[in-house]
Image: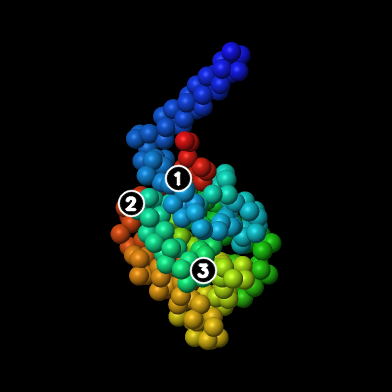
Amino acid sequence: MQKLILFVFAALACAACCRQDSRQSAPLDPVMDMSDFTLVTDVVPDAILEIRYYSTYNFVGSRIDGYEQPVALMTRRAADSLRVVSDELKAKGYRLKIWDTYRPQRAVNHFIRWAENLQDTAMKAVFYPMVDKSVLFEQGYIYARSSHSRGSTVDLTLVEVATGKELDMGTPFDWFGEESHPDYRRLTYMQCTNRLILRNAMLKHGFEPIDSEWWHFTLADEPYPDTYFDFPVSAPCR
Ligand SMILES: [Zn+2]
């Protein structure tokens, strides 16, 4: 009986927590409404996650604001499209490896604060050895807003199932330099081919690339093209 009472109490407490969360994120402030978002791994269970902005291994060198858990969130529409990409590439021997998906505006604000502090170059040797930090804004490495905050953008690469290794794409994720441009010419044949395997599959299933980063794709038919969400990255209450 005591166990039953404890169980009921726990269930009620959880329900209260969920109600409180939904009250906080409810329609008053659309940028806090995560109701149309899903955990990517619920839809794409084969995806491998390495959420760099939750870790300290990123160009800033610390956990980024708003990343409360190492999970990936996307709009349901974008996640459904990514599932199709994943299924197709899995049949060819690859898994998707995801570095970032939805990114709250507060995280973008963190990037801006970091870029304005020219003294902080802790991760320069790894991510931007060839670029002076003072030109990150004018050269388009840091923006005031990111398509990631609209919830239908993903940064990803491919892992070969047979070896468990990432494909060689010519640069690491978040490499600041022209070598990251998808059309960069001085790649090996294998690097070029690997980029095309990823790019062709993403474009075939509704994603669009950008000119500056081979790993970055946005769903062309994104459901929130004008909304820059700001709820934290954490698993939704179930
Ligand atoms: Zn990106």
Q: How far apart are marks 1 and 3 (CA)?
A: 32 Å
- Return the disc, 2 or 1, that comes first in the chain's sequence: 2
Disc 2 residue type (three-letter): Tyr
**Contact between labelled residues 1 and 2, with CB atoms less than 8 Å apart:** no
Label disc, if present, on residue 230 of the rendered structure: 1
Of circles 1 and 3, the one toward us is 3
Taking depth in this image into account, of 142 and 59 the one nearest to the observer is 59
Q: Where 8 sits versus 174, above or below?
A: above
Q: Where 134 sits versus 197, above or below?
A: above
- Return the disc, 2 or 3, that comes first in the chain's sequence: 3
Q: Mark 2 points at which residue?
A: 224
Residue 214 percent location from the top left of the image? 48, 72
> How crowded is the residue under tag 1: few (<14 C-alpha within 10 Å), some, or many (20+)?
many
Q: How far apart are marks 2 and 3 (CA)?
A: 30 Å
Confirm whether residue 170 shows in the render. yes
Q: How far apart are marks 2 and 1 (CA)?
A: 13 Å
Location of residue 59 by image quarter: bottom right
Disc 1 residue type (three-letter): Asp
> How crowded is the residue under tag 2: few (<14 C-alpha within 10 Å), some, or many (20+)?
few
Q: Mark 3 points at which residue?
A: 94
